[in-house]
Structure formats: structure tokens, C-alpha cells
Image (cartoon, helix red, strand yellow):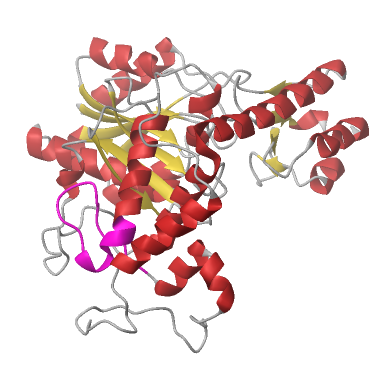
Amino acid sequence: MMKYWKKLTSKQIKESVFAALDKNVDFENDLSIGIPASHLDSKVFFSQAPFLEDAPFMKTLVQNPNHIGCHTLGESEEFFQGTHDIEREAIKILAEDLLGGGADEQDGYIASGGTEANIQACWIYRNYFKKEKKAKHKEIAILCSEDTHYSIPKASNLLSISKFSVPVLENTREITTAAVANTIESAKNKGKKYFIVVANMATTMFGSVDNPQIYIDALKEADVEYKLHIDGAYGGFIYPVTSNNKALSFANPEVSSITIDAHKMLQAPYGTGVFLAKKGLIEYVLTKEAQYVSGMDLTLIGSRSGANAIAVWMILMTYGPYGWLEKMQTLIYRTDKFCCELDKKQIKYFREKDMNIVTIFSNQISNEKAKKYGLVPETHDGNNKWWKIVIMDHVDLNILMQFVNEI
């Protein structure tokens, strides 16, 4: 039963967004001479364009609300309280209705993307281990699979934390109990005692989904401290509605935080991700020096556009939970049909059940065909083993069948 996620008419959405903007500061008419911000430059972006009265997202862009900070915790800037409220509602929809979290048990914010959200998680857990467990910096490590997104090596580099990658089985992209145990043992031999674990809810290249219990069991067997983060940057808006697997959601008490990307499956503007974490964690990255910000700042990015949060909320409310399920199931249907045709031609590929990514062995397709259809290689270094096909909203069955007929 959905508590917050519902379908609204376009009129209701417009009225809600405009009502929120009315609660925000009006740079043109209010006395607001202390804020280091303003509306978009009116010489370039005409704020009185008639079409804006029927375009709530564009209207929000022009009015330019700043969503600095985390609005699910403590105070927020009163100048933008209207659109902050909408972001809070979007976070509750995602954390509780989509990802199975308890009522008011999660914090979160609309980030710039999955990369930022993943780094945010690693930053939080590094600080948590150092403060609560008195861990030495050199004793903390990141544990993930070799298919994990490149944002995790970025986090390792930025935070100066060693990363240990678990090898996966080539044909199934699975982590195994033995591989995880061996990787943990190798890390322990190098003095690592505290682990930031990243499990994938659909990897970017393969759409493969990790079994987090394999990590959990191995870490407990090794008697080490850990925090579990789920990277659902790609799968977060599709896998929870197409699969019955709840192990990568807040319904699993072992999960501490989750990343999802709105600029992938949700088709929000680029630069729109989401970071979600259980209560009591995001405070470990509180920047006390941000004294001029009401509530100070608990995010990596700092100032961010409120329009991105409005976009997420508008898309969610336009579809509602059942409309969204239908949309995602349509993509799964197309993927199923596509895979059936590949099977008929005995084309070798990998596809995670309930996901809309199909990755084909490179020797099954010519480079010319891959280029013609815009397939993405696993690597550009000349040793590519896989070509990726993603069945997105614009990839209909006509295109897929045409592709199959040509290979």
C-alpha cells in the first residue's frame, strides 16, 4: 500500500508546484538583499514568457530555487521552503513507497547523480568508522565487485581508502562465496578491519544484480565491521517494481543506504540522482563550517538546483505507482521478446532477470553492426568482449526486430 505515491492530473501537478513557488522567495518583489542568489538572468532567460504559466518545471528553472542541504533533517533555508517541501515528499516516496523503508526512518536528498551519491555513502561510512569505532584511516577499505561502477574507484581515490574488488563469473556476472571470502581475507592480511560494502542493484554494463547476503555472511564469518550500501543508480527505478527481490531495499535491515539515478530510467534531466540513508548516518558528514546555511550542510555537492527535485516529483506523480509499473513492464516485455529472438539465432548474451539490459559477446556481432545501432562496448581499448544494448523508452520492438534480422 503506497503512503505517498499517487497519480495526479497535470492540473494538480501544476497547481502544487506553483503553490510551492509562491512560498519561496520572490527575487523580483520581496526584500531579499542578503541572499547570494537570484532568478536566472532576465536578459537571457525571459521570466515573463507566457508559456511558463503552463510549464511548472521551466518556471522553477527560471525562479532558480537553491536546495542546499538535506531537508529531511533539521532546519532548511526558509527562502525556498515551498520547493524544499516537494523534495521532502519525493524522498519519502522513494525511500518508503519504492524502496520499502519505514515511516520517517530515512534521510536523503536529490544529488547531482549516482557518482555523487555513491561518494557520499563512502564519505559517511569512513567518518562513521573513524568516529564511532576509533578506526585508523588505513584500516578502512571499500569492498565491491569488479563490475561495480567507476564512481567507487573515484571514492577510493578521493577519500584515500583502499578498494578491494571481488572477481565475478564471466558468463553470469555473479559474485561467489569463495571469491568474496578470499577478497576479505586478502584485505585483512593488509590490515583492513572496517569495510564499506557496495552491492549492485544492476551494474551499468550488464544490469547484473548482486546477492548482498553473500557479502554479509562472509563479513560476519571474517568477524569484521561493515556498512552496506546499495548502488541502484541504474536499477533503482525499475528493479524494485519488476522484481520480488527485496534484499537490495530498506526492507533488508542490513542495508544502510541506497543510490538511485533519476536521469536514467526516470528520464529526468541529466544531473539528477538520489541519495538515501537510514536515520542517524548522514550527520557524520555535517559541515559545521557552513554556518551561514540554515541547518548547515550534510551533502557533498552543497548548492543544487531545486528544479531537479521538482522534475523527480512531477514524473513520479504523473505516472503514479501503477502507471510506473506498466511503463517498466513494457520495457521488460520488449526485452523478453528481444531475448527470444536472440535465442532463436543462438546468439550468446547475458541478461539479468527482471532487467532491461542485454549484453552480447562481442564475437557475435560485427563492429559495423554495433556502430550502426549505437551499441556500447565494455571497453574502448581494443580488447572489447561485450556489446551492451539497453531497452529504454525510445527503443521499441520495431528497432529491436530490425537489429535481430540484420545479425
Magenta residues, as a range? Answer: 65-84
Quadrant holding the C terminus: top right
Q: Is residue 394 above or below residue 85?
A: above
Residue occupying the point 53% across, 45% down: 318
In the picture provided, is 196 more to the left or to the right than 367?
Answer: left
Examine the residues drawn in magenta and state their main secondary structure.
loop
Answer whether residue 68 is magenta in the image: yes
Q: Position of residue 308 (x, y in %)?
A: 44, 57
Percent position of residue 101, x then y:
31, 28
- The residue at the point 26 percent across, 79 percent down is 36
In this rendering, the count of numbered labels is 0
Question: Can residue 258 be seen in this snapshot?
Answer: no
Residue 301, quarter of picture? bottom left
**Residue that sits furthest to the right in the current view:** 406
Q: Position of residue 217 (x, y in %)?
A: 31, 11
The reply, left or right, for residue 372 in relation to residue 232 is right
In the depicted view, which residue is nearer to us: 95 or 156?
A: 95
Asked whether residue 362 is drawn in magenta, I would say no
Residue 84's place in the image compared with 400, above or below, is below
